[in-house]
Image (tube, rainbow, N blue to C red):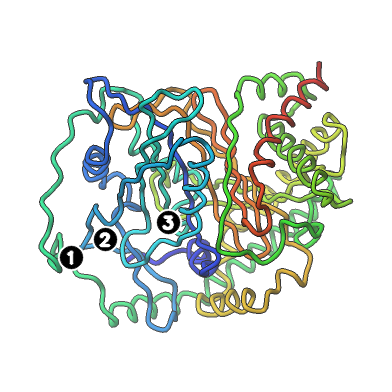
């Protein structure tokens, strides 16, 4: 049994009927294989079965402590059944982006069952997208956020995809199905006594951990203050100072999803033409700010104050590569949506991101990521349920307006058991007070932005997605 960290457990606490907490992604594949075959459901299941040992998230499930007195733990699932995790469907005709968006939205709307490892995949056939071959298929995968973050999710993709088109073609047959109720191994699921032993060890260690975390937070805040007092670095936006927007309200269960694919070389060219020390991430954030300004202004819902984005920052070390769970901290960045000029907007985004980095490093990334360990799991669960039931998201200014997560991916073609990956677009969870997340993933010369939203709050999220390309063009034109 391995207990979840406070950060991992927080994604279980936040999960409600209206807020499933899983990360998702859709991979568009050319189903034609080098050996003349086709990528199908049987091949997907055989590939996954042969690579379960490469990722714990694929084979471990949750066990919860009695009465939620402590954080849940991960254990190997002795009753693992690949057929409970993988299924096939066919997109309705004509099988274009509209139909694929609807399937992604449906998958993001429904939570993963907790009686098995927290992941699921759907092979969608009948895909007919502009520029894609006739035999294209889509694989939609979703994994609970308690099990992975953006970087470990990319590592999971690396466990399944290969740079060699011949790799993964010769797959072993599926293992024979186990009789109902018969475990795959001699490992038994922990009983209530095991839970209590694990919980008691955690409770004994908890006061010391809490005290240490509070001490590190206090020292980090002092260092952050010194960064302002000595270096005169402007502080980043504070939590609860973001403006009220249509994005920040209690969410419904229904999701909306849309994506945009942008050429990465155009973004890099803008970065080279922009001010000194501007990064690719700065340009991406500025493009997102421009698209949000365009979208909200078109709905007469653009606030006078700028939107504030929470930007996750990976603190995963080389020694932690391949580990499950979340190894992330966060920065708050001003997206300058109150600025009409795209160049001035980019400059302010760059300055805000640079300021956030200085203060983030002063406080300490590990200090921020461990602060979620302070509140006991049972109390955090009650607090989250109370927050949702009382619809408190409508009674205060947002902590921040949206999440923008940017994960760099490989810049070479990848193959899933010989099927070439054409595009990969991501999706991330939302919850009360946070009705929009932007998941950004770069792959093989392109940058894909997946926008996940509450359908009640943003019923036309595809209009926002269209604005990413328009915002990029606007910035390009201004610099030439």
Mark 1 vs mark 3, CA separation in Å = 21 Å
Q: At 34% across and 70% down in the image, what residue appears?
A: 63
Residue at numbered disc 2 = 76
- Horizontally, residue 451 falls left or right of residue 116, namely right
- Label 3 to label 2, Cα distance in Å? 13 Å
Nearest to the observer: residue 130 or residue 41: 130
The residue at the point 47 percent across, 63 percent down is 5
Q: Nearer the viewer, residue 6 or 217?
A: 6
Q: First in sequence, mark 3 or 2: give its number.
A: 2
- Between residues 330 and 79, which one lies in front from this camera angle? 79
Query: Tag on residue 63?
Result: none
Whole-percent x and y of residue 301?
82, 52
Q: Which is nearer the N-term, disc 1 or disc 2?
A: 2
Please identify the quadrant where the N terminus is shown.
Answer: bottom left
- Which badge, 1 or 3, is on the more N-terminal residue? 3
Q: Residue 61 is drawn in which quadrant?
A: bottom left
Badge 1: how crowded within 10 Å, few (<14), some, or many (20+)?
Answer: few
User: Mark 1–mark 2 contact, CB under 8 Å?
Assistant: yes
Q: Give coordinates of residue 43: x percent, y percent.
A: 23, 37
Res 153 → quadrant? top left
Please give the name of the residue rendered at 83% of the width and 38% of the height, measured from the top-left corner.
Answer: 348
Question: Which disc is residue 147 wearing?
Answer: 3
- State the SS at label 2: strand
- Spot the residue most to the top: 480
* 314 shown above or below 341: below
Above or below, 113 relative to 36: below
């Amino acid at each position: 049994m391995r207990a979840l960290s406070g950060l991992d457990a927080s994604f279980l606490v936040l999960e409600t009927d209206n807020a499933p907490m899983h990360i998702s992604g859709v991979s568009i594949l050319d189903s034609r294989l080098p050996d003349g075959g086709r990528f199908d459901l049987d091949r997907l299941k055989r590939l996954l079965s042969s690579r379960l040992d490469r990722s714990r998230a694929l084979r471990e499930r949750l066990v919860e402590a009695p009465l939620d007195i402590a954080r849940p733990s991960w254990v190997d699932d002795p009753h693992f059944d690949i057929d409970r995790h993988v299924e096939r469907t066919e997109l309705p005709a004509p099988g274009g982006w509209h139909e694929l968006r609807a399937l992604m939205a449906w998958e993001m709307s429904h939570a993963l069952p907790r009686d098995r490892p927290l992941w699921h995949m759907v092979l969608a056939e009948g895909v007919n997208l502009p520029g894609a071959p006739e035999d294209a298929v889509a694989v939609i995968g979703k994994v609970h956020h308690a099990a992975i973050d953006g970087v470990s999710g990319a590592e999971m993709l690396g466990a399944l995809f290969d740079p060699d088109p011949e790799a993964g073609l010769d797959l072993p047959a599926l293992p024979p199905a186990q009789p109902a109720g018969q475990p795959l191994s001699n490992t038994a699921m922990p009983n209530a006594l095991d839970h209590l032993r694990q919980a008691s060890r955690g409770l004994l260690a908890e006061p010391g951990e809490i005290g240490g975390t509070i001490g590190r937070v206090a020292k980090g805040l002092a260092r952050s203050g010194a960064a302002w007092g000595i270096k005169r670095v402007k502080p980043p936006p504070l939590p609860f100072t973001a403006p009220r927007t249509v994005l920040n309200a209690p969410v419904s269960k229904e999701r909306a999803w849309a994506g945009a694919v942008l050429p990465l070389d155009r973004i890099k060219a803008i970065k080279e033409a922009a001010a000194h020390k501007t990064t690719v991430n700065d340009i991406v954030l500025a493009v997102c700010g421009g698209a949000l300004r365009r979208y909200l202004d078109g709905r007469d819902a653009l606030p006078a104050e700028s939107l504030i984005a929470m930007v996750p920052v990976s603190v995963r070390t080389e020694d932690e590569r391949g580990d499950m769970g979340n190894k992330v901290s966060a920065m708050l960045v001003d997206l300058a949506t109150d600025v009409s000029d795209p160049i001035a907007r980019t400059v302010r985004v760059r300055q805000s991101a640079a300021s956030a980095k200085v203060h983030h490093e002063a406080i300490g990334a590990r200090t921020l990521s461990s602060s979620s360990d302070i509140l006991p799991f049972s109390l955090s669960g009650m607090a989250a349920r109370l927050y949702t039931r009382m619809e408190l998201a409508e009674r205060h200014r947002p902590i921040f307006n949206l999440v923008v997560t940017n994960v760099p991916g490989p810049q070479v073609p990848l193959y899933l058991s010989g099927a070439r990956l054409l595009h990969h677009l991501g999706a991330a969870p939302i919850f009360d007070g946070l009705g929009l997340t932007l998941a950004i993933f770069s792959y093989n010369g392109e940058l894909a932005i997946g926008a996940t939203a509450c359908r009640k709050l943003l019923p036309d999220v595809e209009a926002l997605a269209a604005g990413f390309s328009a915002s990029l063009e606007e910035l390009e034109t201004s610099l030439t």
